[in-house]
Structure formats: structure tokens, C-alpha cells
Amino acid sequence: MDVYTSTLSPALDIGAGCYLLLIAVLSITGNLLVIIMAVKRSSRMKPPELLSVNLAVTDLGAAISMYPLAVASAWSHHWLGGDATCTYYGMVGFFFGVASIMNLTILAIVRFVVSLNLQSPREKISWKTVKMLCVWIWLYALIWAMFPILGWGRYGPEPFGLSCSLAWGQMKTEGFSFVISMFSLNLVTPSIVIIFCYFGIAINLFFTYKKSVNNSKRIPNIVKLHRRLLVIAVLVSIGFIGCWAPYGLVSLWSIFHDSSTIPPEVSLLPCMFAKSSTVYNPLIYYLFSQSFKREVKSMRWYCLGSKMCRVSDSINDNSIYMVSMDMKHKTEVTTLQRSQSHSQ
């Protein structure tokens, strides 16, 4: 039997294709909006915010380079292109997956560094440092994606025949060291670092607030801001890790047990769930960031070509969905508004 022939029913193939098409549209639209909003306010961006933009680029890249082929294959009831496209699809998926988890890890570390001294007006992370971190993320992901091509690990079709990834079932012996290294360095360790960093940030925010609540009105406001940004960052991390955890468990089962014991319909579910990870970030930004929501709503008028309703560049909440916020700017705006009201 052809390994690229779907083992699912035709109706399930069509349903999977429709689901992936919806995921692709939502992911491309949402992450494009994130990038557009970041470009519009690039002159006021803080260095760490580039990491959030980089995360949107990874999600957008995955949606554009992978989902159209997966949709077409699902509707054809057969993986299109054979070995060549299977290797391409598996490599690209692994590449963007590693880039995303490492981006989230670096973002957590940077946020922890920023939270160590909230009262300092000096930038703790420079543009040069953040750019080097972004380059490191892409190079690290590229190296891991190339390992199976070079012989350490292997790409292959999924059991249900309509997707390709790391060939888990074929790496029980010759690629076992790759599997252990990959899970340790690209899932377990990053998850532990993310948990410890955000736990540390929460502790720092708590003690900073307790020390300053009776001495300054500004510091508690900064703490509240960072607490809101912490919630967004934690939700983004939970969304990604939560989406990929079921797929990781099924993959480990394929390594230590016979993968044929898992029905194709069951192996399909965690794979489809993992692909939805590219949608959650823009959705979380929209639900939990008032300024991002405001700009998205204003963007509709901008797209209609109205000169009266273009997106405003003077947004009080300078940090739409990112890491930090220009509190000085917000304070100056508030002071100016108060002085104007007194003069009237």
C-alpha cells in the first residue's frame, strides 16, 4: 500500500482540509495584523518587543509554507508530491516549531531580566542584543531541521497519510538518540525555563508592589502593567506548549510502542490540534490588549480608504502586545491633559 495514500475516510479527509483552510486563513490574517501594527509603531518600539514580532513571523511562515499543501493533499485523499514534498513539509514544520519554542523561551528570559528592576528607566536589553538573539533563534532552528537531512533522524509520512513530520516509528533504533536529544533540548528544557522565568517574574512583581505601595503611586501602576503583560505572555506560552503536548505524547508512544496500535483517526487529532498553535497568539493579543484591539478595529476604516478614520499613531498604551511600555510617555500625556483641564 502507498504510504502517501490517506487511511481516513473521504469525508474525514474533506473535513480535515476545511479545518486546515480555516486555520490557515485565521493564522495568516492574525499574524499579518500583528506585524503590520508593529511596523506602524516601529519608531516607538522597545528592543524586547522585536521578539514578539519574530514570533509572529514564525507563525506566519508556518501557515504560508505548509497549510496550502496540506489542504490540497487532504482534498485529493493522497499526499501530493511524494518523497520530495514530504521531506520539505517535515523539515519546514520542524524548523518553524523549534524556532517558535526557542523564541518563547528567549522571550521569557528577557521578560525576567526586565522585571528584575522595574524602577530603572534605563533599557536593560539593547537593540543589538535582541537582534543577535533573533538571529540565534533562526540559526538554531535551521541546524535542528537539517539534522534529519544529514542522517541524524528522519522525515516521513504520518500514519494517516495526509501529513509529514519526523518519522517517529522509524527512529526506534537508529534515530533514538536524536529523539531523546530533540525532546530534551527543544521541549522539556524550554518548558522548564519558561515556567521558572514566569514564576520568577510573578515573585518580583509581588515584592516590588509590596515595597512601593506606600511610597509611590507610579510604581504600582508599572507593576499592574507588567502583570497584564505577564498574563498575555503566559497565555501565549501555554497556548503553544498545550497545542504541541498531545502530539509529543503520541510521538513518544510511537517510539516506545507499535505505532500501528493507534488508529489513524486518533493520530490525526493531536496533529490537527498542534497546527492550530499559529492562530492563538493574535487572538490572545486581541482579547487581552485594548490598544491592539483598538488598532485592529481602526484598521478596517484604513482599508476602506477613509481619510477621516485612519489608524492613530498616538496610542497611550505604547505596548500593544509586547514586552514593555513607555511609561514616561504615558505619564507626560496624563500630565498634559491635567494641565489643560486646569487652565480651562
Image (tube, rainbow, N blue to C red):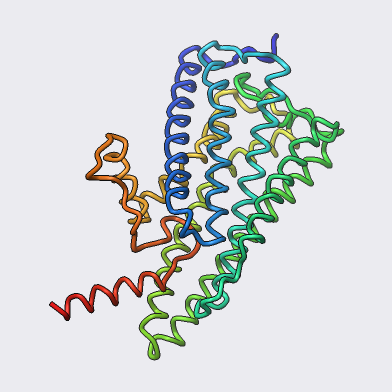
Question: Outermost residue, left direction?
Answer: 344
- The quarter holding residue 290 reads bottom left
Q: Check the picture and name the quadrant holding the C terminus.
A: bottom left
Q: x%, y% of residue 208? A: 48, 81
Task: Indicate the quadrant where residue 331 lies.
Answer: bottom left
Residue 138 pos. (x, y %): 69, 45
Residue at (84, 35) in percent of width and height: 152
Identify the residue at image location x=74%, y=28%: 155
Quadrant assignment, res 95: top right
In the rendered image, the vertical position of residue 309 relative to residue 224, given as above or below: above
Q: Is residue 272 left or right of residue 311?
A: right
Nearer to the camera, 23 or 59:
59
Closer-to-camera residue (179/206): 206
Q: Which residue appears at 45% of the width and 26% of the height?
A: 19
Name the residue furthest top. Answer: 1
**Disc count in the image?**
0
Instruction: Return the x and y of residue 63 as percentages of the image width and height.
Output: 53, 32
Q: Is residue 223 above or below residue 167?
A: below
Looking at the image, which residue is at 50% across and 52% down? 236
Q: As drawn, is 255 to the left or to the right of 7?
A: right
Q: Residue 340 versus residue 51: which sits nearer the camera?
A: 340
| 13 sits left or right of 124 in the view | left
Q: Measured from the top left, where is residue 74 in percent x and y?
A: 53, 17
**Where does the N terminus fall, quadrant-wise?**
top right
